[in-house]
Image (cartoon, rainbow, N blue to C red):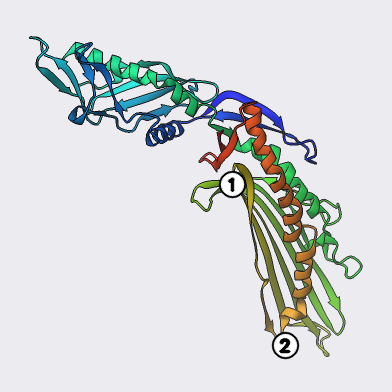
Protein backbone atom coordinates (compact mmCIF):
# COMPACT_ATOMS: atom_id res chain seq x y z
CA UNK A 1 0.00 0.00 0.00
CA UNK A 2 3.06 2.27 0.26
CA UNK A 3 5.20 3.21 -2.70
CA UNK A 4 8.97 3.15 -2.58
CA UNK A 5 9.61 6.90 -2.39
CA UNK A 6 10.08 8.13 1.18
CA UNK A 7 11.64 11.11 2.89
CA UNK A 8 12.78 12.03 6.37
CA UNK A 9 12.34 15.59 7.60
CA UNK A 10 12.87 17.63 10.73
CA UNK A 11 9.92 18.30 13.02
CA UNK A 12 11.51 21.57 14.12
CA UNK A 13 14.70 22.91 15.60
CA UNK A 14 12.88 24.56 18.50
CA UNK A 15 11.36 21.34 19.80
CA UNK A 16 12.58 19.84 23.07
CA UNK A 17 11.99 16.27 21.93
CA UNK A 18 14.71 13.65 21.96
CA UNK A 19 13.93 12.55 18.39
CA UNK A 20 13.33 15.20 15.75
CA UNK A 21 12.77 13.25 12.54
CA UNK A 22 9.65 11.76 11.03
CA UNK A 23 9.34 9.69 7.87
CA UNK A 24 6.60 9.81 5.25
CA UNK A 25 5.97 7.97 1.98
CA UNK A 26 3.69 8.32 -0.98
CA UNK A 27 0.68 6.11 -0.57
CA UNK A 28 -1.74 4.37 -2.87
CA UNK A 29 -4.34 1.61 -2.71
CA UNK A 30 -6.97 0.07 -4.95
CA UNK A 31 -9.75 1.91 -3.13
CA UNK A 32 -7.91 5.23 -3.36
CA UNK A 33 -7.36 4.84 -7.10
CA UNK A 34 -10.98 3.76 -7.61
CA UNK A 35 -12.28 6.74 -5.66
CA UNK A 36 -10.07 9.06 -7.70
CA UNK A 37 -11.46 7.70 -10.98
CA UNK A 38 -15.00 7.94 -9.61
CA UNK A 39 -14.40 11.58 -8.65
CA UNK A 40 -13.02 12.31 -12.12
CA UNK A 41 -16.09 10.73 -13.72
CA UNK A 42 -18.40 12.79 -11.54
CA UNK A 43 -16.51 15.95 -12.52
CA UNK A 44 -16.55 15.09 -16.22
CA UNK A 45 -12.77 14.60 -16.33
CA UNK A 46 -13.02 10.89 -17.10
CA UNK A 47 -15.65 9.83 -19.69
CA UNK A 48 -18.52 7.61 -18.60
CA UNK A 49 -18.67 5.96 -22.02
CA UNK A 50 -16.22 4.80 -24.67
CA UNK A 51 -16.22 6.14 -28.19
CA UNK A 52 -13.64 4.89 -30.64
CA UNK A 53 -13.45 4.48 -34.41
CA UNK A 54 -15.51 5.80 -37.29
CA UNK A 55 -17.91 4.13 -39.69
CA UNK A 56 -16.89 6.55 -42.42
CA UNK A 57 -13.14 5.94 -42.10
CA UNK A 58 -12.60 2.46 -40.82
CA UNK A 59 -15.99 0.78 -41.09
CA UNK A 60 -15.83 -0.16 -37.39
CA UNK A 61 -16.87 1.88 -34.36
CA UNK A 62 -17.40 1.30 -30.66
CA UNK A 63 -20.07 3.36 -28.93
CA UNK A 64 -22.21 6.18 -30.22
CA UNK A 65 -25.59 7.66 -29.43
CA UNK A 66 -28.72 6.10 -28.01
CA UNK A 67 -28.59 2.33 -27.76
CA UNK A 68 -25.10 2.31 -29.25
CA UNK A 69 -23.67 4.22 -26.28
CA UNK A 70 -20.95 2.05 -24.69
CA UNK A 71 -21.34 3.02 -21.05
CA UNK A 72 -18.81 1.93 -18.46
CA UNK A 73 -19.53 0.40 -15.13
CA UNK A 74 -17.40 1.68 -12.19
CA UNK A 75 -13.75 0.94 -12.85
CA UNK A 76 -12.32 -1.73 -10.54
CA UNK A 77 -8.68 -1.42 -9.49
CA UNK A 78 -6.66 -3.92 -7.50
CA UNK A 79 -3.34 -2.98 -5.95
CA UNK A 80 -1.07 -5.31 -4.00
CA UNK A 81 1.56 -3.74 -1.75
CA UNK A 82 3.70 -6.83 -2.36
CA UNK A 83 4.01 -5.67 -6.00
CA UNK A 84 4.00 -1.87 -5.55
CA UNK A 85 4.86 -1.00 -9.17
CA UNK A 86 1.73 -2.45 -10.85
CA UNK A 87 -2.03 -2.31 -10.56
CA UNK A 88 -4.80 -4.36 -12.18
CA UNK A 89 -7.74 -2.57 -13.83
CA UNK A 90 -11.07 -4.10 -14.78
CA UNK A 91 -13.22 -2.28 -17.35
CA UNK A 92 -16.73 -3.65 -17.84
CA UNK A 93 -19.34 -2.28 -20.24
CA UNK A 94 -22.91 -1.88 -19.05
CA UNK A 95 -24.39 -1.23 -22.50
CA UNK A 96 -23.57 -0.33 -26.08
CA UNK A 97 -22.74 -1.85 -29.44
CA UNK A 98 -19.94 -2.45 -31.83
CA UNK A 99 -21.05 -1.19 -35.27
CA UNK A 100 -19.76 -2.52 -38.57
CA UNK A 101 -20.86 -2.93 -42.18
CA UNK A 102 -21.95 -6.32 -43.45
CA UNK A 103 -19.82 -8.20 -45.92
CA UNK A 104 -21.90 -7.23 -48.98
CA UNK A 105 -21.32 -3.50 -49.14
CA UNK A 106 -21.43 -0.34 -47.06
CA UNK A 107 -25.19 -0.09 -46.87
CA UNK A 108 -26.36 -2.16 -43.93
CA UNK A 109 -24.87 -1.54 -40.49
CA UNK A 110 -24.72 -4.53 -38.19
CA UNK A 111 -24.42 -4.34 -34.41
CA UNK A 112 -22.73 -6.55 -31.88
CA UNK A 113 -23.92 -5.92 -28.28
CA UNK A 114 -21.05 -5.43 -25.87
CA UNK A 115 -22.95 -5.23 -22.57
CA UNK A 116 -21.11 -7.39 -20.04
CA UNK A 117 -17.87 -7.47 -22.01
CA UNK A 118 -14.91 -7.17 -19.65
CA UNK A 119 -11.25 -6.38 -20.18
CA UNK A 120 -8.44 -6.80 -17.68
CA UNK A 121 -5.47 -4.42 -17.91
CA UNK A 122 -2.13 -4.22 -16.11
CA UNK A 123 -0.87 -0.68 -15.54
CA UNK A 124 2.14 0.77 -13.79
CA UNK A 125 2.24 2.67 -10.50
CA UNK A 126 5.06 5.20 -10.25
CA UNK A 127 7.10 6.17 -7.19
CA UNK A 128 4.66 8.99 -6.41
CA UNK A 129 1.66 6.64 -6.17
CA UNK A 130 0.37 7.70 -9.60
CA UNK A 131 -1.44 5.36 -11.97
CA UNK A 132 0.47 5.18 -15.26
CA UNK A 133 -1.76 4.17 -18.20
CA UNK A 134 0.57 5.02 -21.10
CA UNK A 135 1.67 1.40 -21.45
CA UNK A 136 -1.38 -0.38 -20.04
CA UNK A 137 -1.50 -3.95 -21.38
CA UNK A 138 -4.59 -6.09 -21.82
CA UNK A 139 -4.62 -9.58 -20.35
CA UNK A 140 -6.82 -11.38 -22.86
CA UNK A 141 -6.84 -14.66 -20.92
CA UNK A 142 -8.48 -12.99 -17.92
CA UNK A 143 -10.91 -10.95 -20.01
CA UNK A 144 -14.48 -11.89 -20.91
CA UNK A 145 -15.47 -11.39 -24.56
CA UNK A 146 -18.48 -13.62 -25.40
CA UNK A 147 -18.14 -13.47 -29.18
CA UNK A 148 -16.89 -15.87 -31.87
CA UNK A 149 -15.88 -13.15 -34.29
CA UNK A 150 -12.11 -12.80 -33.96
CA UNK A 151 -11.71 -9.49 -35.85
CA UNK A 152 -14.46 -7.87 -33.76
CA UNK A 153 -12.79 -8.96 -30.53
CA UNK A 154 -9.41 -7.69 -31.74
CA UNK A 155 -10.95 -4.33 -32.64
CA UNK A 156 -12.69 -4.13 -29.27
CA UNK A 157 -9.42 -4.79 -27.39
CA UNK A 158 -7.58 -2.21 -29.52
CA UNK A 159 -10.36 0.35 -29.14
CA UNK A 160 -10.61 0.12 -25.37
CA UNK A 161 -6.82 -0.01 -24.95
CA UNK A 162 -6.19 3.08 -27.07
CA UNK A 163 -9.08 4.92 -25.41
CA UNK A 164 -7.72 4.09 -21.95
CA UNK A 165 -4.20 5.18 -22.84
CA UNK A 166 -5.51 8.48 -24.19
CA UNK A 167 -6.65 9.32 -20.64
CA UNK A 168 -3.20 8.65 -19.18
CA UNK A 169 -2.10 12.30 -18.59
CA UNK A 170 -5.31 13.28 -16.77
CA UNK A 171 -5.34 10.14 -14.62
CA UNK A 172 -1.66 10.45 -13.71
CA UNK A 173 -2.13 14.10 -12.75
CA UNK A 174 -5.00 13.23 -10.41
CA UNK A 175 -3.49 10.14 -8.80
CA UNK A 176 0.21 11.01 -8.43
CA UNK A 177 1.24 12.94 -5.31
CA UNK A 178 -2.27 12.77 -3.96
CA UNK A 179 -1.87 10.98 -0.67
CA UNK A 180 1.04 10.47 1.70
CA UNK A 181 1.23 8.08 4.62
CA UNK A 182 2.98 8.23 7.96
CA UNK A 183 3.36 4.81 9.53
CA UNK A 184 1.67 4.31 12.89
CA UNK A 185 4.76 2.98 14.65
CA UNK A 186 6.95 5.75 13.29
CA UNK A 187 4.45 8.40 14.38
CA UNK A 188 4.06 6.95 17.86
CA UNK A 189 7.75 6.33 18.42
CA UNK A 190 9.20 9.49 16.92
CA UNK A 191 6.46 11.99 17.61
CA UNK A 192 3.92 11.04 20.30
CA UNK A 193 6.41 9.46 22.67
CA UNK A 194 8.82 12.40 22.95
CA UNK A 195 6.14 15.10 22.73
CA UNK A 196 3.48 13.55 24.96
CA UNK A 197 4.65 10.53 26.93
CA UNK A 198 8.07 11.82 27.97
CA UNK A 199 6.62 15.14 29.06
CA UNK A 200 3.89 13.47 31.06
CA UNK A 201 6.48 11.13 32.59
CA UNK A 202 8.51 14.07 33.87
CA UNK A 203 5.42 15.63 35.41
CA UNK A 204 4.46 12.39 37.13
CA UNK A 205 8.01 12.00 38.44
CA UNK A 206 7.70 15.40 40.10
CA UNK A 207 4.74 14.27 42.22
CA UNK A 208 5.41 13.03 45.78
CA UNK A 209 5.84 9.28 46.01
CA UNK A 210 2.96 7.97 48.10
CA UNK A 211 5.20 5.28 49.53
CA UNK A 212 6.76 7.99 51.72
CA UNK A 213 3.47 9.54 52.84
CA UNK A 214 3.68 8.02 56.38
CA UNK A 215 7.34 8.88 56.96
CA UNK A 216 7.70 10.60 60.32
CA UNK A 217 4.07 9.87 61.20
CA UNK A 218 3.84 6.12 61.68
CA UNK A 219 6.01 3.02 61.47
CA UNK A 220 4.68 0.93 58.61
CA UNK A 221 4.64 -2.85 58.60
CA UNK A 222 6.83 -3.81 55.59
CA UNK A 223 5.42 -7.34 55.39
CA UNK A 224 1.91 -5.99 54.79
CA UNK A 225 2.84 -3.13 52.43
CA UNK A 226 2.92 -3.08 48.64
CA UNK A 227 4.75 -0.82 46.22
CA UNK A 228 3.86 -1.74 42.64
CA UNK A 229 5.21 0.50 39.91
CA UNK A 230 4.96 -0.20 36.20
CA UNK A 231 8.18 -0.74 34.29
CA UNK A 232 10.49 -1.07 37.33
CA UNK A 233 11.28 -3.36 40.26
CA UNK A 234 10.23 -1.16 43.17
CA UNK A 235 10.69 -1.74 46.88
CA UNK A 236 9.65 0.36 49.86
CA UNK A 237 13.03 2.07 50.00
CA UNK A 238 14.83 1.97 46.61
CA UNK A 239 13.22 5.15 45.31
CA UNK A 240 12.18 3.76 41.91
CA UNK A 241 9.39 5.64 40.17
CA UNK A 242 6.80 4.13 37.84
CA UNK A 243 7.45 4.29 34.10
CA UNK A 244 5.17 4.27 31.08
CA UNK A 245 5.20 0.90 29.38
CA UNK A 246 4.20 0.23 25.79
CA UNK A 247 1.21 -1.85 24.75
CA UNK A 248 -0.61 -2.44 21.46
CA UNK A 249 -2.62 0.79 21.64
CA UNK A 250 -0.11 3.15 23.24
CA UNK A 251 1.33 3.44 26.76
CA UNK A 252 0.13 2.76 30.30
CA UNK A 253 1.41 3.93 33.67
CA UNK A 254 0.55 2.62 37.12
CA UNK A 255 1.78 3.60 40.57
CA UNK A 256 0.07 1.50 43.25
CA UNK A 257 1.02 1.81 46.92
CA UNK A 258 -0.57 0.13 49.96
CA UNK A 259 0.68 1.03 53.43
CA UNK A 260 -0.13 -0.82 56.66
CA UNK A 261 0.56 0.37 60.21
CA UNK A 262 -0.84 0.37 63.73
CA UNK A 263 -1.96 3.14 66.06
CA UNK A 264 -2.28 2.23 69.76
CA UNK A 265 -3.77 4.00 72.76
CA UNK A 266 -6.81 2.76 74.71
CA UNK A 267 -7.74 0.95 71.50
CA UNK A 268 -5.60 -0.63 68.83
CA UNK A 269 -6.16 0.57 65.26
CA UNK A 270 -4.95 -1.53 62.32
CA UNK A 271 -4.71 1.02 59.51
CA UNK A 272 -4.32 0.72 55.77
CA UNK A 273 -3.96 3.51 53.26
CA UNK A 274 -3.91 2.78 49.55
CA UNK A 275 -3.35 4.94 46.48
CA UNK A 276 -3.61 3.76 42.87
CA UNK A 277 -2.60 6.28 40.19
CA UNK A 278 -2.96 5.24 36.56
CA UNK A 279 -2.38 7.08 33.28
CA UNK A 280 -3.03 5.98 29.72
CA UNK A 281 -1.97 7.41 26.36
CA UNK A 282 -3.61 5.66 23.43
CA UNK A 283 -3.85 6.31 19.70
CA UNK A 284 -6.89 5.05 17.84
CA UNK A 285 -9.50 5.58 15.13
CA UNK A 286 -12.32 7.80 16.26
CA UNK A 287 -14.92 9.35 13.98
CA UNK A 288 -14.73 13.08 13.46
CA UNK A 289 -17.73 15.40 13.06
CA UNK A 290 -18.18 14.12 9.49
CA UNK A 291 -18.10 10.45 10.53
CA UNK A 292 -14.68 9.80 8.96
CA UNK A 293 -12.10 8.07 11.21
CA UNK A 294 -9.48 10.63 12.26
CA UNK A 295 -6.16 10.17 14.09
CA UNK A 296 -7.03 10.52 17.76
CA UNK A 297 -4.93 10.58 20.92
CA UNK A 298 -6.69 9.88 24.21
CA UNK A 299 -4.90 10.85 27.44
CA UNK A 300 -6.59 9.77 30.66
CA UNK A 301 -5.75 9.55 34.32
CA UNK A 302 -7.45 7.85 37.28
CA UNK A 303 -6.69 8.27 40.97
CA UNK A 304 -8.03 5.82 43.54
CA UNK A 305 -7.73 6.40 47.29
CA UNK A 306 -8.78 3.89 49.93
CA UNK A 307 -8.59 4.09 53.74
CA UNK A 308 -9.33 1.25 56.15
CA UNK A 309 -9.40 1.24 59.96
CA UNK A 310 -9.97 -1.85 62.12
CA UNK A 311 -10.45 -1.31 65.87
CA UNK A 312 -9.60 -3.66 68.75
CA UNK A 313 -10.16 -2.90 72.43
CA UNK A 314 -8.38 -4.34 75.44
CA UNK A 315 -10.68 -6.31 77.78
CA UNK A 316 -10.24 -5.32 81.46
CA UNK A 317 -10.04 -8.86 82.88
CA UNK A 318 -8.19 -10.86 80.24
CA UNK A 319 -5.96 -8.03 79.04
CA UNK A 320 -6.58 -9.39 75.56
CA UNK A 321 -7.64 -7.25 72.62
CA UNK A 322 -11.04 -7.99 71.16
CA UNK A 323 -12.15 -7.00 67.67
CA UNK A 324 -14.86 -4.34 67.75
CA UNK A 325 -15.43 -3.20 64.19
CA UNK A 326 -13.96 -1.44 61.20
CA UNK A 327 -14.63 1.42 58.82
CA UNK A 328 -13.56 2.06 55.26
CA UNK A 329 -13.80 4.89 52.73
CA UNK A 330 -12.98 5.12 49.05
CA UNK A 331 -12.72 7.94 46.49
CA UNK A 332 -12.10 7.76 42.74
CA UNK A 333 -11.19 10.79 40.62
CA UNK A 334 -10.58 10.80 36.89
CA UNK A 335 -10.20 12.97 33.83
CA UNK A 336 -9.68 12.42 30.11
CA UNK A 337 -8.46 14.53 27.22
CA UNK A 338 -9.16 13.67 23.59
CA UNK A 339 -7.00 15.25 20.90
CA UNK A 340 -8.13 14.73 17.31
CA UNK A 341 -6.38 15.93 14.18
CA UNK A 342 -8.63 17.66 11.66
CA UNK A 343 -8.15 19.80 8.56
CA UNK A 344 -9.59 23.27 8.21
CA UNK A 345 -8.77 25.71 5.40
CA UNK A 346 -5.84 23.61 4.20
CA UNK A 347 -4.11 23.42 7.58
CA UNK A 348 -4.07 20.65 10.17
CA UNK A 349 -5.27 21.55 13.64
CA UNK A 350 -6.15 19.70 16.81
CA UNK A 351 -9.64 19.61 18.26
CA UNK A 352 -9.57 19.14 22.03
CA UNK A 353 -12.27 17.62 24.21
CA UNK A 354 -11.68 17.48 27.98
CA UNK A 355 -13.81 15.61 30.48
CA UNK A 356 -13.51 15.67 34.26
CA UNK A 357 -15.81 13.76 36.56
CA UNK A 358 -16.77 14.67 40.11
CA UNK A 359 -15.18 12.45 42.77
CA UNK A 360 -16.98 9.13 43.17
CA UNK A 361 -17.07 8.11 46.83
CA UNK A 362 -18.42 5.37 49.03
CA UNK A 363 -17.86 4.31 52.64
CA UNK A 364 -19.17 1.97 55.29
CA UNK A 365 -18.71 0.34 58.69
CA UNK A 366 -19.03 -3.13 60.22
CA UNK A 367 -19.28 -4.22 63.84
CA UNK A 368 -19.13 -1.68 66.65
CA UNK A 369 -17.39 1.25 65.01
CA UNK A 370 -18.88 4.45 66.38
CA UNK A 371 -18.70 7.24 63.80
CA UNK A 372 -21.42 9.39 62.26
CA UNK A 373 -19.94 9.30 58.73
CA UNK A 374 -16.89 7.18 57.91
CA UNK A 375 -16.11 9.08 54.69
CA UNK A 376 -14.95 12.42 56.17
CA UNK A 377 -13.61 10.56 59.20
CA UNK A 378 -11.11 8.66 57.03
CA UNK A 379 -10.77 10.71 53.82
CA UNK A 380 -10.55 14.44 53.22
CA UNK A 381 -12.06 14.31 49.73
CA UNK A 382 -11.94 18.08 49.29
CA UNK A 383 -8.22 18.20 49.93
CA UNK A 384 -7.59 15.22 47.64
CA UNK A 385 -9.62 16.88 44.88
CA UNK A 386 -7.72 20.17 45.24
CA UNK A 387 -4.44 18.27 44.88
CA UNK A 388 -5.83 16.33 41.91
CA UNK A 389 -6.82 19.53 40.10
CA UNK A 390 -3.66 21.45 40.87
CA UNK A 391 -0.73 19.01 40.65
CA UNK A 392 1.87 18.95 37.89
CA UNK A 393 0.11 16.11 36.03
CA UNK A 394 -3.42 17.52 36.34
CA UNK A 395 -5.82 17.98 33.45
CA UNK A 396 -5.17 21.73 33.37
CA UNK A 397 -1.40 21.21 33.26
CA UNK A 398 -1.62 18.61 30.50
CA UNK A 399 -3.95 20.81 28.46
CA UNK A 400 -1.73 23.85 28.75
CA UNK A 401 1.69 22.30 28.33
CA UNK A 402 1.41 19.01 26.48
CA UNK A 403 -1.76 19.44 24.41
CA UNK A 404 -1.04 23.07 23.65
CA UNK A 405 2.46 22.32 22.38
CA UNK A 406 1.21 19.36 20.37
CA UNK A 407 -1.42 21.47 18.63
CA UNK A 408 1.11 24.18 17.77
CA UNK A 409 3.66 21.75 16.37
CA UNK A 410 1.15 19.66 14.40
CA UNK A 411 0.31 22.15 11.67
CA UNK A 412 3.95 22.79 10.78
CA UNK A 413 4.80 19.10 10.92
CA UNK A 414 2.09 18.00 8.51
CA UNK A 415 2.85 20.91 6.20
CA UNK A 416 6.43 19.67 6.11
CA UNK A 417 5.24 16.32 4.75
CA UNK A 418 4.12 17.89 1.47
CA UNK A 419 7.24 20.01 1.16
CA UNK A 420 9.51 17.07 1.93
CA UNK A 421 7.85 14.72 -0.56
CA UNK A 422 7.23 17.23 -3.36
CA UNK A 423 9.58 20.23 -3.08
CA UNK A 424 8.31 23.24 -5.00
CA UNK A 425 4.87 21.80 -5.74
CA UNK A 426 3.12 23.89 -3.04
CA UNK A 427 0.82 21.05 -2.08
CA UNK A 428 -1.58 21.67 0.78
CA UNK A 429 -3.33 19.31 3.14
CA UNK A 430 -6.91 18.68 2.06
CA UNK A 431 -7.84 15.80 4.34
CA UNK A 432 -6.40 13.71 7.13
CA UNK A 433 -7.58 10.29 8.21
CA UNK A 434 -6.41 7.07 9.81
CA UNK A 435 -6.76 3.76 8.00
CA UNK A 436 -7.57 0.32 9.36
CA UNK A 437 -3.89 -0.42 9.92
CA UNK A 438 -3.55 2.64 12.12
CA UNK A 439 -1.39 4.56 9.62
CA UNK A 440 -2.08 8.27 9.03
CA UNK A 441 -3.09 9.16 5.47
CA UNK A 442 -2.70 12.75 4.30
CA UNK A 443 -4.58 13.82 1.18
CA UNK A 444 -2.69 16.55 -0.64
CA UNK A 445 -3.69 18.98 -3.35
CA UNK A 446 -2.69 22.28 -4.91
Q: Is residue 182 visible?
A: no
Quadrant position of the C terminus in the picture: top right
User: Mark on residue 53?
Assistant: none
Quadrant location of residue 91?
top left
Mark 2 crowd level (few <14, some 14–19, many ≥20, 10 Å Cα): few
Coordinates of residue 127 in the picture (x, y in percent): 55, 21
The residue that appears at 73% across and 51% down in the rendered structure is 404
Judge depth for marks 2 and 1 and give the one in front.
1
Please give the residue where the numbered disc 1 appears in the rendered image. 344
How far separated are the C-alphas under marks 2 and 1? 57 Å
Task: Indicate left or right for 335 with 316 as reference.
Answer: left
Nearest the viewer among 223 and 365 is 365
Coordinates of residue 421 in the picture (x, y in percent): 62, 27
Quadrant location of residue 150?
top left
Q: Secondary structure at mark 1?
A: strand
Please give the residue where the numbered disc 2 appears in the rendered image. 372
Q: Are marks 2 and 1 in contact (CB under 8 Å)?
A: no
Task: Indicate left or right for 296 with 18 as reference.
Answer: left
Mark 1 crowd level (few <14, some 14–19, many ≥20, 10 Å Cα): few
Residue at the left extreme of this rendering: 104
Q: Is residue 417 above or below residue 209?
A: above
Amino acid sequence: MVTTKAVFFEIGSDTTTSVQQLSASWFTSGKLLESTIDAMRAAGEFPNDIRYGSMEVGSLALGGEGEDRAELRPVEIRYDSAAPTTAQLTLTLASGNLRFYNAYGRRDILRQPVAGWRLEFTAAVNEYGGLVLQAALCDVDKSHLPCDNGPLKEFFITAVGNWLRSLAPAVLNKTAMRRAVIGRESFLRQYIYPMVVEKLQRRLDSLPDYVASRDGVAQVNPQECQNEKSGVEATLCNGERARFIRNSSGWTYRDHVLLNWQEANRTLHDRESEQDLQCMVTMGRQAGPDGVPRPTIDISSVLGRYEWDSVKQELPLSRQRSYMGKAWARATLQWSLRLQWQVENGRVGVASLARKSVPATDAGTTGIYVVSDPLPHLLNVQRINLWWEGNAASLASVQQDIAGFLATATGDMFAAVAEGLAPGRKLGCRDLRINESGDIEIELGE
